[in-house]
Every structure is written in C-alpha cells, then in structure tokens.
Image (cartoon, rainbow, N blue to C red):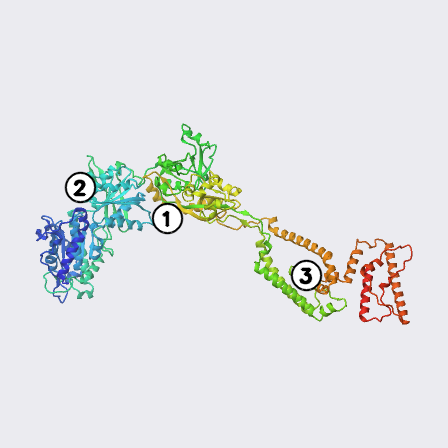
Amino acid sequence: MHARTALMALAALGALAATGAAAERGGGIKVGSSATGAGGREGARGGGVRLGVDGLRRPRTSPAPQAPRAPSVITAALVVPHKAFGARDYTRAEKAALSKLPRKLKLFSHVRLNVTLSMQGLTPSPMSILDSLCKEFLAVNVSAILYLMNHEQYGRSTASAQYFLQLAGYLGIPVIAWNADNSGLEKHASHASLRLQLAPTIEHQTAAMLSILERYKWHQFSVVTSAIAGHDDFIQAVRERVTALQDRFKFTILNAVVVKKKKAAVLNELVTSEARVMLLYATQEEAADILSSAGDLHLTGENFVWIVTQSVLGSMQQPNKFPVGMLGVHFDTSSSSIIAEIATAVKVFAYGVESYVSEPENIRYPLGTRLSCSGVGTGEARWSTGERFYRHLRNVSVEGESSKPSIEFTPDGELRAVELKIMNLRPTLGDQLVWEEIGTWNSYPKERLVIKDIVWPGGLHTPPQGVPEKFHMRITFLEEPPYINLAPPDPVSGRCSLDRGVICRVAPDVEVAGLEAGTAHRNSSLYQCCSGFCIDLLQQLAEQLGFTYELVRVEDGRWGTLHHGKWNGLISELVNKKTDMVLTSLIINSDREAVVDFSVPFMETGVAIVVAKRTGIISPTAFLEPFDTASWMLVGAVAIQAATFSIFFFEWLSPSGFDCSTGLNSKRIPQNRFSLCRTYWIVWAVLFQASVHVDSPRGFTARFMTNMWAMFAVVFLAIYTANLAAFMITREEFHELSGLDDPRIARPLSQRPALKFGTVPWSHTDATLAKYFPEPHAYMASYNRSTVSAGVTGVLTGELDAFIYDGTVLDYLVSQDEDCRLLTVGSWYAMSGYGLAFTRNSKYLSMFNKRLLDLRSNGDLERLRRYWMTGTCKPNKQEHKSSDPLALEQFLSAFLLLMAGILLAALLLLLEHVYFRYMREHLAASSASSCCALVSLSMGQSLTFHGAVVEAAARGFGPGKRGHCRSAICAAQVWRARHERDAAVARARQLAAALAAHGLQPPPRRLASAAALLAAGRPHDTTRPRTLHAPADLLPDLDRPLSCGDLRARERTRVEMETVL
C-alpha cells in the first residue's frame, strides 16, 4: 500500500476512534466544521471524518534524500492553543527556554536547536491537522513535537488531541505533551504512540484522592462517573490503586456508578448503599447535574463527602452549583501554566538530543524525519529513528528549579514527580462559594499529603465518619441450638454474662408494655439471654455496619409456612412488616423467597434423619463367626475326618499297634485298648486342648500323625481365638436408612412393623415432606414433636425410631450426646442454606450481603461454624471405644454353647439306654459284635461274656453298691470265701487229673453263663463252713485232651469268675 494512502486511511480511522466516546454522549464530533489551523487559517474543507476520502488531495510521505552526516540544525515543532496575540508570548517563552539551556551541553558545539511554532484551535479539523503535519512539520524535518494544550472540554478537543497524537505516533515522531485533558485520552492509543506526558495523569489524581481517604480512615467508598471520555480508565485506575495499597490500608469499593446522559436515576443504587464517601469524575456541567440529583436523594448532607477530579474543577468557575465542603484535586491549566510548561518541554527535548548525539553509534541515524507529503517516490511511511530517539527522551533527567525535583519519566512515559493541589469548596463572607487551596499532594520523594483546616459538608469543622450513622433494627428470632440458645439472665442485675450472649425478649409486646426495663430484664419469663452461632454473627455485623438492635421472639413459635393461603411464624412477621429482619436457622426456599428477601446463605443444610444405636444380643452362633461356613465345613468334614481315619488306620496297620487279625479272629484278649471312637476322642481332645484321659496309640506312625494333628490344632486355635473377640462383643444395631427415599420412610405402611418417625410441625422439613412425600407426612402426624430436642429425646428413649429435621441441627445434637448413641444416617435431601430474611425491597439487604461475603472470604464464618458445631461425638457411624466392664451379653453365646452341650449329652444318654434295652441283645446274637468292638470298645465289651462280667462287677461290687464290704468282718468272710473257692478249684483239678489217669474222660460241657456264676456266688449262711458246689455244667469234660485254645478260654473264664466273685 502507498504511504500516502495508508496515512489517509489511518487518519480517517483515527478520527472515528477518537470521536467515538464523545459521539455516544453528544451526538458526534463534526471535525473541521469551524476550526482554524496554524496561523489562523480556516480549514480548507469541512465534513468531519469524510476528509481524505471524498475528493481530497491525498498527500504521500516518502523518504527524502539522506544527508551523509548529522544535521547541524535539529528542529522541534511547538503546538500550543490558538490565542489572539498569543504568538508573541509563546515565541518569547520558547526563546527564553533555549537561552537558559546550560552551555555545558555538548550539543551546542555542533548542533543548533530550532523550534517551529504552530497554534491550533479548540477543535481543529482532521484536514487542518494533516496540513500541520505535512506542510509545517515534515517540511522542516522536525525531530519531535512539543504538544501543549490546556483545553478541558472532554469532547471535540479531546478527540482532536487524540487524533493528532495518534497520527504523530503513526509517523514515528516522538511527542512531548502537556494535556490538561489527558485523562480522556485512550490508553491503548497512548501505548501505540511515542508520547511523554508532563501533565499529571488520572493515576496521579486517583492516588491523591485515596490519600485523603487514608488520612481520615475512610475504608469504604463509591465511584461515580459520567460518560466522559476516559471514565473506564478512571475506574480501572482506582481499582489498581486500591489493590496496590491493600497491604497498607484496606479499601472497599462499594459501588461503581456510571451516569449516562442525564439518567441520574442510577444514583438510587447509592441510596441503599452504606457509602458515605464518593469519588466523582465528570465534566463541570455533568457534575452539576449529578450533584443536584444526589441532593434530591439526600446524598449531599453533612454525612456525605464528595471528592472530585480536575475535570470537575476545571477553571474553578460556577462553584455555587456544588454543595459546600467538597474536596478536589487540581493542577493549574491556565494560559500562564502553558507558558511555564514550554520551558520544561524545551529542556526535555534539549537533554534528549544531548543524550542521543552523545552516543557514537547514533551518527548513522540523523535526527531528521526526512519524510514528505509531496507524493514523490514510495517507501516507508514511518520514521524508523523515532523510536530510538524516544528512548533517549524518556530516559532524561532534567534538573528542576529550586525546591523542585528532577524531571524524570516512568517506562510508560508519565512524569514521576507530580504535585497536586487539594482544594476545598467553602463559603466566603458574601455567602459565595469558592475553591480554596488547603493542601498539596506530592509523589516525591515518596507520597505525602499536607492538609490545613477544612470546611466539611454541612459547614462543619469535624470530618464525617465516612460510614452510616447507627440505625436501629427490630430483629425477630426463634431459638434452635446451636444457632440461638436461651438461658435465664442474672436474677439480680438482669444482665447476661459474657458467655451467655445478649439480652432478648421472649414475651409478647403486650406483656412488657409499661414495665420498667430493669425490672423486666430480671424476669426470666419476659427476657432471657440469647447466645449461639447467629448471635455471634449478629454482633460482628452490628459492629461493622454500626447499628443497634432489639431481639424479639416470634409470638406463635413457628418457623413460617403457608397454611390455607396465609403465612404464619417468622415469615408472617416480615410480610406484615412487624420486624426488620429475621435471624435464626431459617432455611431459604422458593415459597419464602416469593414474599421476602433473603441474604446470601451463611450456612448450607438439608433434610437429614437421626437414629439411635441399640445394644443388640450376640448371635447364638457368634462363636462360629470367626470362620465362614466353608471354613467350618473344611475343618469338620475334611480335616477332622482325615486325621481320625489316618491315626486309626496307621495304628491298625502298624506292627506294634492294633492287629486286625488278632483283634477280629483271635480269642486272645487285646492288650492295646484302641478303637475308632477312641481315635475321635483323642482328635477332639487335642483339637480343643482338653485336659481329659485319652488312650494314646502305640504305633509310631499313628503317634507321629497325632503330633501333626496337634500342630494343626495349635495354628487353628491361634487363628480362632485371635478373631473370636471381634465376634463375641455386643453388636450396636441401628436403622440404616438411605434417606427420605428409603422404602421404610417413603412407604411406611408397607413395612411390618412400621417405622415410627416424625418431625417438627410448621417447619421447613414439615413443608418439604408435605409437598414431596404426602404419604409419610400423613402417617407421621401422630409421631411429630413440638421441638427438635423433644424429637431427639424420643429417639433416645425408643418412643421414635427416627427423627427428620435440618441436617446441621441434627449434627450438632448428635455431637453433644454424652453417650454417643445418636447418629445421622442416609443422604441429605433438599439441599439449601440458612439466610437472613428481610422485608421485600429492604434497604438493608445489600449492606448485609456485602458483609456476609466478606466474613465468608476472610474465614470468619468457618471459624464460627467450627466453634459452635464441634462436639465430642461424630454425627456419622462410629465405633464405641470406651473401656466398660464385660457384661453377660459379651459371652452369652458361650453359655448357649454349654447349654447345647448339656442337651446333646442328655440325648446321648437316652440313646445309650435305648441301646442297652433294645439293641444290645440283638447285636450280641449277630456276627457284628467284632465290628462293633472295632468302632467302639465299650460297645464291643457289652456284647461279650467278659463285658457282661465287667458290667455285672460294676453293678454288684462297685463303691456304694450291693456286695461291697463296709466292715472288717465282711472283709474276713469274703477272704475266707475266696480261699475256699481256690481250694475247691484245686481239688477239682486234682480229680480231673485222676480221672484222666484212669482213662476216664467226662463229656464236654459248656461253661456257665455269667448269670449262673453270679447265682453261684450268692451270699450264704456265714455261720457255717461253706462248701463250694459247682454245678456239673460248670466244669469241662475232664476226659477230653485240652488244646491251647481251650486253655486260653479256661484262663479267660477263670479271670471272669474271679472278677465276679
């Protein structure tokens, strides 16, 4: 694109951008309609932003031929306001400034400075601005532009200045500016340009205004602006300054109000705010309208302070339109100030040239734009050396006048050392208002504010507090721990101690009417002490907002629900405007929000369920619970059986153990008393470590297997006993409900037995259940309680199975339970929050919301919650960890096991009697007696002759039985009977031997039965010598030769007979 075309396009766009804000406010800026250019020439063509687009000659800039060395003359353009006969003053000031430059500057040795003067009107046309740049400045190869304007119209003039500076920045020409209306210049445009600002900026003004607030400890304020150019930059500058001072002084911006055109109705936002200090940024005319509307809204009284910027003061004319006591920041913008600033701008330019030419590498970049608008040639349209020269200008340090700091700039091109005047609007003797300087604000060497006596708003001589005056509120409450607790006051003083909160009235208005306050306060039926979470919150809010209050309990004692189209309880107090605010654990819901205003929530909550833990009975099978069913089956059906049969068969098959052939087929009496039942006995005895008599196996293999089983028993018992304690303690049982959706709650009549639960009637929970759970709501009507404490007590005593209420309240009561028997179960339903309730459109709502948000952000609400909500017990499920003595319930299953063992033993006794009475005779006659002995020795013995003898002996000669001698005579007789028996046996043997010697052999005879032997051993007359007459069938056939088997049988018979006798 050609340089000429680019410059003209930028000019048109710049005019549009620069006039945008003013166009919105005043219907557009007709640039060039009546402006004069330098030297008083009328603009060649009007038409505003159409200039350069419709038929105009479009100048092009092209590089001029470069000189081989730095020019001997360096020119700067001086742009000043147009003033009749003012050229002479400007020229004189410029020459005086050049002449006063120190001759020590090296630039005077080979460089001569020249200044070209150009005066511009208030609103020059874009064509006039282009002519100044092309025909006046570029023609003489200016190296910088000194742009000094004191216009403060913030309309066309500001747009023209914005346009001029934007075009200069596009051309790459540095600008040393002093704009009285620099606060209206767009920031993004100033960043794109190469501009140094000598005038105080809007940032300096905001710093001075906040210094006043800091001096008088005004922490909160509001910002009010019109649609003036730069109003967004003013608000942003205030916010940035507040953030920068946050560590030193905490400010709070309550409102930021922008009044567009004459719509002062937005000031109503300040009426409901607690702001008493306002920072105003507008033009004089706009400020007069805003303050007039503020007066109508009673925002300009003695309690309100208005601090204004330079744009409001301007030339300090027409002060009578403003209220007395206003404060403002000001710097001189008169014509004389322009003359004084010319010298400063020339100094900065000269020192910048000095710095630039002092660097040898800059000799390749001469200080001359060498740009032309003649349209000759093509090339760059921007002076590339301009940015290099700008950096030298920005880094200069020019010595100031006496007592003045050096002139230096920030990286943004703003002046570091600034002094602003603090002005006060005060009356004179003629009741006229004038702006009077009362102090200064300096940014050097550090920020400092010096202020003399001030006439404050309302003509007072003391500053206002900057916060609202104390106001009184009537606050209604309803007690509910831990949010509001009630306790009686001191009966003597009628006051509350520090830990009991504040005095509050619990009686209706009619009962306390006409009573003396001191007497009434000592009556606990009329007044009590309120404490708790809400009371601590109220005291913090009262301290910060500065209000007094009266706490009154709601008369009907209800929370507030809609009943037959009419509100009751707390909500009724607000609807009927009987109170200003409701403070308690009042849940926010849609029905209540339709008729009252709620603050932001200060606590979250929901509908929860509380139940009690019951001490249950230990299960009768608790001793079996350390192992599951599969483990017990593995031990009982596999391990015990495998060990028993292994030991038995190892003993049976062992050479040194029980011989199968000997035991089953031989007539020999086995010496090893072992059987399958005795193997079970030893296995069970070893498994349970029983101290009982057992018959150990004789075989080595069987003994080894027994030891292995003992090792298994040790491991098994260790694992069993280690886990037994966990299952032998008393179980804590409770109703594990999942929430209000649990079938036992949602459909109570479908369960048998039905769950007993209730809530507090006329509460939020009651309304929620009635709306969403009509069936359980109707069912629980008979179980409802008047207060939550009564409901929780009913759960503890067993009158209720569960109680439904607000979650946070139930959590608190659970944590305060001494025995920790309460717990909340299930998920919370209908999550909501607690809030402060106000009447509709209350003026207090916004200030309370602001404070609640501050308390939440700084952690005060969380600290209050932890203080009041924390207790010993946890609301959720927990283990009982107290060390209590063991009760019967802890080992009840052991007694149940013992009882089961006794019953089983009785059953076995019955089976034993059945066996001996009905089964033994049949088994003895069968061939299964040997197998029975293999299974059980006792059973086998009961089926043999030897067993019958032993049984008879046990019955006839046991201790305490018939036949047992209890004296020495009896014992002697028994001994003689045994001697005679032995003699008879010996004689019988002799006779048998004699018969055998004569070849006589008696026929074989069977041995007598055990009954016959017992008959033979009956008692006889002991007074006469007794001769044993053995029946003939008792003796064997003496003629038959005796085999080894016969001898063994006879020996066994003899032993049995001896045992019987």
> Within 10 angstroms of label 2, few (less than 14), some, or many (20 or more) residues?
few
Question: Within the image, what quadrant is residue 470 found in?
Answer: top left
N-term-proximal mark, 3 vs 2:
2
Judging depth in this view, the residue of 346 and 62 nearest the camera is 62
Whole-percent x, y for residue 336 in the image: 15, 47
* Residue 102 visible at all: no
Image quarter where the N terminus lies is bottom left
- Amino acid carrying label 3: it is Trp
Name the side, left or right, on which 38 lies relative to 967.
left
Residue 455 position (above or below residue 915): above
- Of badges 3 and 1, nearer the viewer stands 3
Depth order, front residue of 802/841: 802
- Between the C-alphas of marks 2 and 1, the distance is 46 Å
Q: Secondary structure at mark 3?
A: helix
Q: Percent from the top left, x then y, of residue 378? A: 13, 65
Residue 681 numbered tag: 3
Secondary structure state at the residue bearing disc 1: helix
Q: Which residue is mark 1?
A: 857
Tell me if residue 834 can be seen: yes
Mark 2 or mark 1, whichever is nearer to me: 1
Cβ atoms under marks 3 and 2 closer than 8 Å: no
Dot placed on the residue nearer the N-terminal end, 3 or 1: 3
